[in-house]
C-alpha cells in the first residue's frame, strides 16, 4: 500500500545537494538592478521601502518629494549626482522605449538637445538640458524590470566623464527594487519611505525630544522631471 521508505542519503550526497541549493540561491546575473524577489548580492543598502539603495563612504543621499510623498532619491558624489525613481510597469511589456521618446520630446521642447546612444545598461539618452540659461549635460538611463521600471538620471561631471560616472553606475547596478503585489497603474511612482532609524529621529523631533544626527536625508533637487 505504501511505497518503500527512501534510504537515508550519505553525507557526501547530502553535501552535494546542499551545495546545489547554495548555487541556486546565487544571482543568475552578474549585475542588477535587482528585483527583490530574485537572489542578489549582499552589501550595505539604505532600506527606503520600495527601493534598497546602495551606500558607500562619501555618498550624500537626498530624497525627492512629491507633496508629502517620497518618490525618488539622489546620490551625490563630488561634482556628480545620480537621481533614481522606480515606477510600476506592465507585466509583459517594458516601457523604456516609450519613456525615452517622451523624455527626448520634453528636453527638445524646453530648448535642449537629446540623442540616443549605447551605454552600459543598453540604449540611453544623452541630453543637454537648459538650466538658468546654460545647457547642462545629462544622461537618462532606463531599466525595465519585472512589473517595474527604474529611471536613472546622471548629471554633473559624471554625465561626460567615464571615471566620475563609474561609482554612480555601480549604484544603479546594485539597487534593489521592491515592487510589491498591490495593483498599480503603469508609470505610477513606487512610493518610498524613510528608513526606520530616520523615521524614529523625525518622530522624536516632532515630539520635542532630543534627536541624534541619524537623518542624512532632505528634499533633493528635481533634474528635468519629465514623463
Image: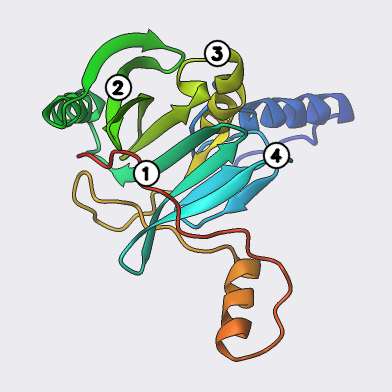
Dots 4, 3 in contact, CB < 8 A: no
- Please report whichever mark, 1 or 3, sits nearer to the chain's N-terminal start: 1
The Cα–Cα distance between marks 1 and 2, rounded to whole angstroms, is 23 Å
Nearer-N-terminus badge (1/2): 1
**Mark 2 surroundings within 10 Å by alpha-carbon count, few (fewer than 14), some (14 through 19), many (20 or more):** many
In terms of sequence position, does the residue under pointer 2 or pointer 4 come before the other?
Answer: 4
Give the numbered dot on residue 162. Answer: 3
Which numbered disc, 3 or 2, marks the residue that appears first in the sequence? 2
Name the residue that disc number 4 marks.
56
Which callout, 1 or 4, points at the residue further toward the start of the chain? 4
Instruction: Residue at 24%, 50% (x, y): give it.
Output: 188
Residue 58 is situated, as x and y percent measured from the top left of the image, at 71, 40
Question: Is mark 1 in CB contact (under 8 Å) with mark 3?
Answer: no
Q: Which of marks 4 and 3 is nearer the N terminus?
A: 4
In this orientation, does residue 31 appear? no
Give residue 170's quadrant in the image: top right
Task: State the image coordinates of residue 138 (x, y, percent, origin top left).
Answer: 37, 25
Q: Which of 191 and 147 is in front in this view?
A: 191
Camera-side residue of 31 and 181: 31
Work out whether 187 lies above or below 10: below
Q: Which mark is residue 86?
A: 1
9 or 214: nearer the viewer: 214
Comparing marks 3 and 2, which lies closer to the viewer? 2
Amino acid at each position: 500500500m505504501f511505497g518503500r521508505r527512501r534510504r537515508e542519503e550519505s553525507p557526501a550526497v547530502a553535501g552535494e545537494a546542499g551545495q546545489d541549493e547554495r548555487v541556486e540561491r546565487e544571482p543568475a546575473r552578474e549585475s542588477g538592478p535587482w528585483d527583490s524577489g530574485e537572489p542578489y548580492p549582499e552589501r550595505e543598502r539604505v532600506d527606503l521601502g520600495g527601493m534598497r539603495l546602495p551606500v558607500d563612504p562619501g555618498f550624500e543621499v537626498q530624497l525627492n518629494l512629491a507633496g508629502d510623498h517620497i518618490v525618488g532619491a539622489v546620490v551625490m558624489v563630488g561634482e556628480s549626482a545620480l537621481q533614481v525613481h522606480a515606477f510600476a510597469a506592465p507585466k509583459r511589456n517594458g516601457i523604456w522605449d516609450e519613456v525615452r521618446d517622451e523624455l527626448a520630446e520634453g528636453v527638445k521642447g524646453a530648448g535642449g538637445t537629446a540623442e540616443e546612444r549605447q551605454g552600459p545598461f543598453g540604449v540611453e539618452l544623452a541630453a543637454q538640458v537648459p538650466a538658468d540659461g546654460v545647457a547642462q549635460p545629462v544622461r537618462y538611463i532606463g531599466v525595465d524590470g519585472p512589473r517595474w521600471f527604474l529611471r536613472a538620471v546622471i548629471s554633473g561631471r559624471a554625465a561626460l566623464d567615464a571615471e566620475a560616472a563609474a561609482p554612480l553606475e555601480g549604484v544603479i547596478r546594485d539597487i534593489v527594487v521592491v515592487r510589491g503585489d498591490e495593483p498599480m497603474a503603469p508609470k505610477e511612482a513606487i512610493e518610498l519611505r524613510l528608513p526606520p532609524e530616520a523615521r524614529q529621529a523625525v518622530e522624536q523631533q516632532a515630539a520635542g525630544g532630543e534627536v541624534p544626527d541619524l537623518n542624512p536625508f532632505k528634499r533633493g533637487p528635481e533634474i528635468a522631471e519629465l514623463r
